[in-house]
Image (cartoon, grey):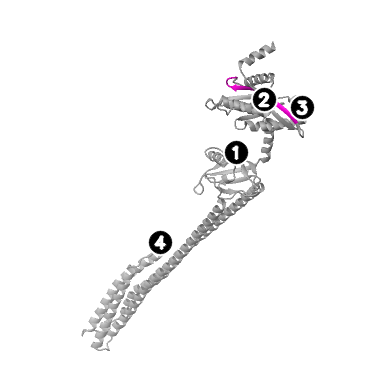
């Protein structure tokens, strides 16, 4: 589940990351197109202004020529005074139009500014153009003054045609027009230069933008390939982990802090017959769930620990598992969790149980043996003082058991011991535990009695159990009784050996009195034994 979430997040990251560069490319391309259009508009606007000024200068040149024609016509001797006045007025009007056109052109040119710094050549041409237009002003004034002087002398009565020189007029006109022609050439050169420099600027910007887009595309391709490679690696790792989880013999369970199952490996099905359901409490599958879950929760505060758990199979029997419980650090997505890695130990537990029975249970009667008796007594004696109970140790010896073996055989004796052991266990159930400590000798540890009267009642039940006729060996009957010796802890001994000695002496006292009797140890028994040994 966590791997699937990470995979989806990776896909979203790739989509978002790919969308951002594509958006940047679109924005950059749109910006480049917009910049190109803006530069084209600016170039066209500037060229249009230059072209308009060029038209003004050409028109001024045409007006200058027309003014010269009017001046020559006014100086002709074959016209009337009225015609001469009209030609003189045309001369003034042409000069006035020249002044008006050049003033407008000068103002326009003075307002021209290069849109980009560093365009030195066009700036020099523009500066020369302004200078030529300024020098034309003085030439025009000289031309106007010359023309007016000639016209005013022409109307005088003493005017002589020999005083008028056409060559002089043409020379002065040529000098005046030369400044205007140079200005016209300069403005043409300026228009060509500004167009050339705009193209160079645009080419440089296009080259920079193209390089930027190319590098951006390379970065996008590299990072996308890197992300795809990482995603493929994650998918391979996910497939590997899934393959391990599905094929490994160990069982893996991941739970949240509340014990709800987040993941269970498919390997559970091979042993349990099912896979624990995701979202179900782990306690639904573990025997003694409250105790087991408490162990698991205690592990989150410390280091990993090993626990032995039992899980119910689909057939209903319990399967033993040795489980390593490891706490997992929390995150924003998942809080602290538990990882359970288990392996089946049912066969090992069966061996251990068999060894335990062999070590602590009698192989004939299946009740606890002498080793178990010592461990049981040690556990009771070493209890803390506030939890310590009064203990009665009763040793029981079956009267006439040797006669049973001699008359009916050992198989009948074994059968009798098995019957006696089962009933002995039932008789002391709830008040203590019975043990076979050898042959026909049994020990009963009583530690759940509350008064001497209750102890006497239990001992009487034990005597009644023995004092009856038993049916063994396919219907053969056998009557027996018991000699019982009782020692109390801590009155008659503080150790197991002391209690056994006291109970043994009391038992032999009962046997010496003819059996079928329960005797409680006292100091007089020691004196009797001392007298008998002298």
Q: How many marks?
A: 4
What segment is highlighted magenta in the picture? 477-492
Residue 405 is marked as 3
- In the picture shown, does residue 219 fall above or below 423? below
Is residue 487 one of those drawn in magenta? yes
Q: Upstream in the sequence, badge 2 or badge 4? A: 4
Q: Is residue 466 visible?
A: yes
Regarding mark 1 in the picture, which secondary structure is present there? strand
Which quadrant of the view contains residue 371? top right
Q: Which residue carries the number 4 mark?
A: 118
Q: Earlier in the sequence, mark 3 or mark 2?
A: 2
Question: Where is residue 243 shown, x and y percent of the image?
Answer: 64, 50
Real-space CA distance between mark 3 and mark 2, rounded to the nearest whole angstrom = 18 Å
Q: Disc 2 or disc 4, which is closer to the eye?
A: 2
Spatial CA distance of label 1 from label 3 is: 49 Å
In the rendered image, which residue does mark 2 sit on? 396
Q: Quadrant of residue 85?
A: bottom left
| Crowd tier of the residue under label 3, counting other residues whose Cα lies within 10 Å: few below 14, some 14–19, many 20 or above | some
Query: Residue 307: which disc?
Result: 1
Label 2, secondary structure: give it: strand
Q: Secondary structure at mark 4?
A: loop
- Whether residue 189 can be seen here: no
Instruction: Identify whether 311 is placed above or below 400.
Output: below
Looking at the rendered image, the disc whose residue lies closer to the viewer, 4 or 1, is 1
In magenta stretch: residue 364: no
Residue 294: percent from left, percent from top: 54, 39
State the CA–CA distance, disc 3 to disc 4: 131 Å
Residue 338 sits in which quadrant? top right
For residue 96, side relative to residue 325 (left or right): left
Closer to the observer: label 2 or label 1? 2
């Amino acid at each position: 589940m966590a791997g699937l979430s990470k995979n989806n997040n990776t896909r979203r990251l790739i989509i978002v990351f790919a969308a951002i560069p594509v958006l940047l490319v679109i924005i950059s391309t749109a910006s480049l197109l917009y910049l190109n259009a803006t530069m084209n508009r600016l170039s066209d606007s500037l060229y249009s202004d230059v072209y308009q000024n060029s038209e003004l200068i050409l028109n001024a040149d045409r007006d200058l020529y027309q003014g010269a024609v009017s001046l020559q016509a006014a100086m002709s001797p074959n016209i009337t005074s009225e015609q001469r006045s009209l030609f003189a007025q045309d001369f003034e009007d042409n000069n006035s139009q020249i002044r008006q056109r050049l003033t407008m052109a000068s103002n326009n040119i003075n307002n021209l500014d290069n849109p980009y710094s560093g365009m030195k050549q066009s700036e020099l041409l523009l500066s020369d153009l302004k200078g030529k237009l300024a020098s034309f002003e003085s030439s025009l004034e000289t031309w106007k003054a010359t023309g007016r002087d000639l016209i005013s002398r022409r109307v005088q009565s003493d005017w002589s045609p020999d005083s008028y020189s056409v060559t002089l007029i043409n020379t002065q006109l040529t000098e005046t027009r030369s400044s205007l022609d140079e200005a016209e050439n300069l403005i043409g050169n300026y228009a060509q230069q500004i167009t050339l420099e705009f193209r160079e600027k645009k080419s440089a910007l296009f080259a920079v933008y193209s390089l930027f887009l190319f590098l951006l595309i390379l970065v996008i391709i590299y990072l996308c390939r890197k992300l795809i490679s990482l995603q493929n690696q994650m998918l391979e790792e996910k497939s590997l982990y899934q393959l391990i989880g599905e094929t490994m013999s160990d069982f893996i369970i991941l739970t949240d802090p509340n014990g709800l199952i987040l993941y269970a490996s498919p390997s559970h099905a091979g042993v349990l017959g099912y896979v624990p359901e995701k979202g179900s409490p782990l306690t639904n599958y573990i025997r003694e769930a409250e105790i087991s879950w408490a162990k698991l929760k205690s592990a989150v505060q410390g280091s990993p620990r090993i626990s032995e758990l039992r899980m119910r199979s689909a057939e209903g029997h319990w399967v033993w598992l040795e489980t390593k419980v490891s706490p997992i650090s929390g995150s924003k997505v998942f809080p602290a969790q538990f990882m359970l890695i288990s392996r089946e130990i049912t066969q090992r537990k069966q061996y251990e149980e068999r060894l335990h029975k062999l070590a602590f249970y009698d192989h004939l009667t299946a009740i606890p043996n002498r080793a178990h008796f010592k461990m049981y007594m040690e556990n009771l004696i070493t209890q803390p003082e506030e939890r310590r109970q009064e203990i009665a140790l009763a040793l029981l010896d079956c009267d006439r058991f040797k006669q049973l073996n001699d008359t009916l055989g050992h198989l009948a004796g074994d059968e009798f011991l098995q019957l006696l052991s089962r009933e002995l266990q039932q008789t002391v159930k709830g008040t203590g535990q019975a043990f076979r400590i050898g042959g026909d000798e049994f020990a009963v540890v009583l530690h759940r009695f509350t008064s001497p009267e209750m102890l006497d009642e239990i001992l009487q039940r034990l005597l009644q159990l023995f004092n009856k006729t038993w049916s063994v060996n396919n219907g053969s009957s056998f009557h027996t009784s018991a000699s019982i010796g009782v020692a109390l802890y801590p009155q008659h001994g503080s150790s197991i050996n002391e209690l056994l000695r006291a109970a043994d002496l009391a038992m032999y006292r009962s046997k010496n009195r003819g059996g079928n009797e329960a005797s409680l140890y006292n100091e007089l028994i020691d004196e009797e034994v001392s007298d008998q040994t002298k």
